Image (cartoon, grey):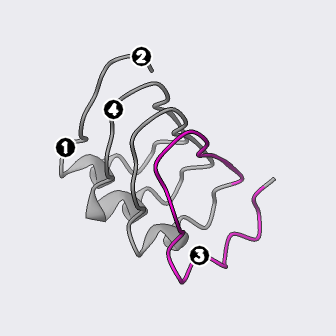
Amino acid sequence: SYNQLTQLPNDFGQLQNLNILILFFNQLTQLPVNFSQLQNLTALFLSMNQLTQLPNNFSQLQNLTALDLPDNQLTQLPTNSTPFQHLT
């Protein structure tokens, strides 16, 4: 948080043991395509960035129970984003 990050490394999806990710108050405009490989991710906080879209395979994060996206530039979610049954 508060790091002025503009992008994440392309190999970010290899952090497969990551459970909670807090990246609010940065300048992220997109997430890496392999972001959906973070299969153990349960909480994701991305508010106050510049995200314009989420990867199409974002809904593959099936262990996600908390998702925070306010104050971005998102106009729509991926069309296949319905499987987020565990979000609170």
Q: Position of residue 74 (x, y in %)?
A: 49, 56
Single out the residue that lies furthest toward the top.
Answer: 2
Mark 1 vs 2: CB contact within 8 A: no
Q: Mark 4 or 1 closer to N-term? A: 1
Viewer-nearest of discs 4 and 3? 4
Query: Considering only vertical position in the picture, is 19 above or below 30?
Result: above
Among the two numbered marks 3 and 2 on one chain, the one whose residue lies closer to the N terminus: 2
Vertical arrangement, residue 66 with respect to residue 55, above or below: above
| Of labels 1 and 2, the one closer to you | 2
- Tell me the mark number nearer the camera, choosing from 4 and 2: 4
Distance from the alpha carbon under mark 4 to that under mark 2: 9 Å
Which residue is denoted by mark 3 in the rendering? 81
Disc 3 and disc 1: Cα gap in Å? Answer: 24 Å
Q: Residue at image x 31%, y 52%?
A: 30
Label for residue 2? 2
Dot 1 corresponds to which residue?
9
| Amino acid tagged 3 | Ser
Q: Which of the two labelled residues, at mark 4 and mark 2, occupies the earlier sequence position?
A: 2
